[in-house]
Image (tube, rainbow, N blue to C red):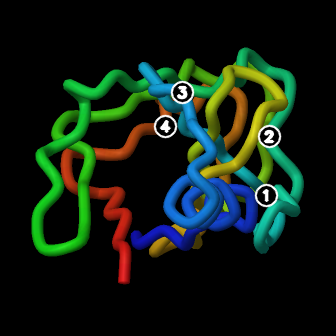
């Protein structure tokens, strides 16, 4: 699954490079699941309820960037659902555990219906690839 850059992130990068606007270091990013299409800064419909929570990832959870891309280096595991989450079709990368700003978003390679009692949904190592260029 590849991710696309959000409008928010595009503007932050342009302002930092061309307008000298400082941007603070980000220690963790949060992976979110969606049942609706994501575009730009419109996050679609994020999963809610049933023990759902975004998953915090630290810099150590990502491989070193290479050839214009970066991938998750370990498994990213969400909580076990205690209610039906619906058919998950997209993922997003955010700067906060709730609300916040989207950095990247993308389609899942295969949509997945997640129901109460299913095992904890996860992305195995290298399942998420973010590409610049």
Q: Earlier in the sequence, mark 3 or mark 1?
A: 3
Q: Secondary structure at mark 2?
A: loop
What residue is pinned by disc 3?
24
In this figure, what is the number of numbered marks?
Answer: 4
Q: Earlier in the sequence, mark 2 or mark 4?
A: 2
**What residue appears at the point 55 percent right and 59 percent down from the top-left corner?**
13
In front: label 3 or label 1? 3
Question: Which corner quadrant of the image does residue 63 belong to?
Answer: top left
Determine which of the numbered discs, if any, sits on residue 121 in the image.
4
Disc 3: CA contacts within 10 A as few (<14), some (14-19) or many (>=20): few
What residue is pinned by disc 2?
47
Mark 3–mark 4 distance (CA, rounded to whole Å): 31 Å
Q: Earlier in the sequence, mark 1 or mark 2?
A: 1
97 vs 110, nearest the viewer: 97
In front: label 2 or label 4? 2
Tell me where residue 125 appears, x and y as whole percent: 20, 46
Q: Which quadrant is the N terminus positioned in?
A: bottom left
49 vs 102, nearest the viewer: 102
**What residue appears at the point 11 percent right and 63 percent down from the top-left corner?**
66
Q: Pointer 3 and pointer 4: residues touching (CB < 8 Å)?
A: no
In front: label 3 or label 2? 3
**What residue appears at the point 73 percent right and 57 percent down from the top-left corner?**
8
Tell me where residue 62 appears, x and y as whole percent: 23, 39
What residue is pinned by disc 1?
35
Mark 3–mark 2 distance (CA, rounded to whole Å): 28 Å
Disc 4: CA contacts within 10 A as few (<14), some (14-19) or many (>=20): some
Q: Is residue 26 above or below residue 38?
A: above
Mark 2–mark 4 distance (CA, rounded to whole Å): 12 Å
Q: Secondary structure at mark 4?
A: loop
Mark 3–mark 1 distance (CA, rounded to whole Å): 31 Å
Q: Pointer 1 and pointer 2: residues touching (CB < 8 Å)?
A: yes
């Amino acid at each position: 699954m590849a991710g696309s850059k959000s409008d928010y992130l595009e503007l932050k990068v342009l302002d930092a490079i061309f307008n000298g606007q400082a941007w603070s270091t980000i220690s963790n990013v949060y992976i979110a699941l969606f049942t609706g299409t994501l575009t730009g800064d419109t996050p679609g419909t994020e999963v809610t309820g049933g023990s759902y929570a975004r998953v915090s990832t630290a810099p150590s959870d990502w491989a070193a960037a290479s050839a214009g891309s970066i991938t998750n280096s370990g498994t990213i595991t969400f909580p076990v659902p205690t209610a039906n989450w619906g058919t998950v079709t997209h993922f997003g990368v955010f700067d906060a555990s709730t609300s916040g700003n989207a950095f990247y978003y993308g389609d899942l390679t295969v949509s997945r219906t997640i129901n109460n009692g299913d095992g904890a949904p996860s992305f195995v190592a290298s399942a998420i690839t973010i590409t610049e260029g």
